[in-house]
Image (cartoon, rainbow, N blue to C red):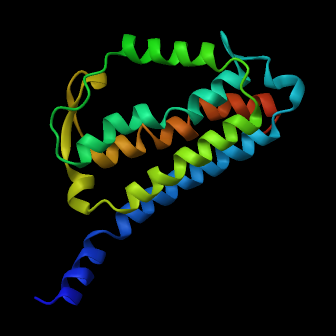
Amino acid sequence: MGVAALEYNREVIVGQRSTEVAQRFESAVAEFETAVQAVPDDKWNAECEAPWTTAQVAAHIAGQFPLESEIFMPAADGDKALSAFTWAEVNGRNDARAAAEANATKDDVLKTIRDGARPIAAYIRGLTDEQLDRKSPLSLADGAEVTTQQLLEGGVLIDHVGGGHLASIKAMAGAPVGR
């Protein structure tokens, strides 16, 4: 098989599904950015999700990609030993970062989400169907086997950006909460 045929086959394998997942991620990020921009200044440091302020919730989402990458990248790469986080560890990291981000500005949050989202979207686009279908046990789900695609679309990435936290940010912005 010639080089051109190999490249064509790689494009077919790395293609539609990974592109669709990446687009869903980018759409969730764009919706999050829009919601953050819409929060009035007088509500930015107000309590949003007890005990966190709007700034802390937004910074939590924006800064979460490194932790999330520790979960879905090993799964995609076939490493059955995913990071064995406990909910106590995740919550501890979240609370520590929330304390550190108490004074985050909208500009800080938007820069963090944009800088973090670009490489994640590119990574997702490069995944093959085989990588999206790989199963690994997830400690945060009592060891249940989940596919890389489930990790990406579920609470680990896309739903984390566009889920409950987004509804809280939208409520602070006075925007409709439904998608």
Please tell me which residue is depicted at 37% across the width and 69% down the height of the picture. Answer: 16
**Residue 37 lies in quadrant:** top right
Residue 155 visible, this angle:
no
Residue 54 percent location from the top left of the image: 72, 24
Q: How many marks?
A: 0
Query: Vertically, is 79 above or below 15?
Result: above
Residue 61 percent location from the top left of the image: 57, 32
**Residue found farthest to the left:** 1
Please tell me which residue is depicted at 52% across the width and 54% down the height of the picture. Answer: 118
**Residue 176 lies in quadrant:** top right
Please tell me which residue is depicted at 33% across the width and 44% down the height of the picture. Answer: 150
Residue 158 percent location from the top left of the image: 48, 43
Residue 88 visible, this angle:
yes
Residue 66 percent location from the top left of the image: 44, 35
Query: Vertically, is 111 above or below 67?
Result: below
Please tell me which residue is depicted at 41% across the width and 35% down the height of the picture. Answer: 68
Say which of 67 and 36 sits in front: 67
Q: Is residue 129 left or right of residue 112?
A: left
Say which of 26 and 142 sits in front: 26
Q: Is residue 21 left or right of residue 5?
A: right
